[in-house]
Image (tube, helix red, strand yellow):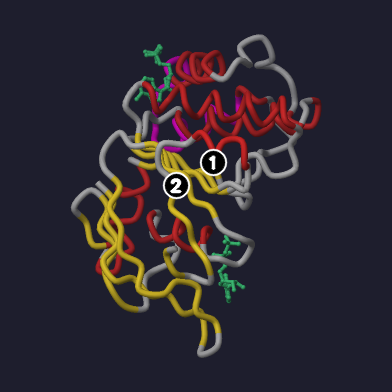
Amino acid sequence: MIEFQHVTKQYGPDATALRDVSLTINKGELVFLAGPSGAGKSTLLKMIAAMERPSSGHVIVNGQDIGRLKAAGVPFLRRNLGLIFQEQRLLNDRSILANVMMPLMVTGAPRAQAEQRARAALDKVGLGDRTNSLPLALSGGEQQRVSIARAIVNRPQIILADEPTANLDRASAERVFDALRAFHSVGVTCVISTHDEVVLDAAARVIHLRQGALE
Ligand code: ADP
Ligand code: ADP
């Protein structure tokens, strides 16, 4: 489902983020990405979403070569991806329900259907009773679970999460991981970068990166 073939990514002559990375992530897998800050975790995740392209090598997602994907193909690729990245903040001027409805509204879904699906998604992350709240009225962990609901409301085949529990306390982090594991358990492929030692120790599969290379 996701394949990296000898992938190198250079942002500039002195900035090599990934070095000759080859790996395969199968459909339905839950995979954690570990490594110190600057190891290349975000870059690897961004390449799966065509937010960055390889300098050399190939990244294949659902049979498509990301390096050869035309601009018009990017929305089709992303339709199958749920993205949980720091860059994608919630909109603070509208309810969490409106935030989660947004990915459906932009694809032209009828409002009633979007609302019903968004409510179901918020239920799944344990926020079904907070739909009218504004994001800033929620704790950091709750906001992160809203981001998960927004990422999965389109029923993507793949979820990509970049350090989704950074800055959260233990209990909040556990609830965020539980929400992600729940989608994995219904067949969604999940790739999650984290520094969380408790989660990494218990994980079935961890990809370790150091200075852009697999360990
Ligand atoms: P991580 O997510 O593990 O912290 P990143 O993928 O963010 O690692 O970064 C890997 C390396 O690439 C770092 O040395 C970082 O400084 C560099 N880097 C990341 N993004 C850019 C960019 N847009 N321009 C230049 N260098 C970058
Ligand atoms: P509904 O059919 O009313 O939308 P479901 O209980 O079937 O309700 O799904 C609830 C929500 O779970 C969906 O709206 C969707 O956001 C989310 N979801 C995302 N991916 C999946 C998946 N692979 N399987 C089930 N639910 C998913």
Magenta-drawn stretch contains 58: no
Q: Position of residue 6 (x, y in %)?
A: 29, 71
**Residue at the extreme top:** 129
Q: Is mark 2 within 8 Å of ligand 1?
A: no
Q: Residue furthest left?
A: 63
Q: Residue at x 60, y 29 (%)?
A: 176
Please, what secondary structure does the residue beneath circle 1 have?
helix
Instruction: Confirm or deny contact between disc 1 and disc 2 (CB under 8 A).
Output: yes
Which quadrant holds the C terminus?
Answer: bottom left
- Residue 52: name its quadrant: bottom left
Q: Callout 1: 10 Å neighbours few (<14), some, many (20+)? A: some
In-image side of 53 versus 176 (left or right): left
Above-or-below relation of 33 to 58: above
Give the structural element (helix, strand or loop) at label 2.
strand
Name the residue at 35% across, 50% down: 75
For residue 117, which quarter of the picture?
Answer: top left
Give, as a three-letter code, the residue at label 2: Val
Nearest to the observer: residue 198 or residue 9: 198
Q: Earlier in the sequence, mark 1 or mark 2?
A: 1
Q: Badge 2: how crowded within 10 Å, few (<14), some, or many (20+)? A: many
Range shown magenta: 98-113
Q: Position of residue 135 (x, y in %)?
A: 73, 30
Q: Nearer the viewer, residue 202 or 165?
A: 202
View quadrant of ligand 1:
bottom right
Q: Which residue is mark 2?
A: 206
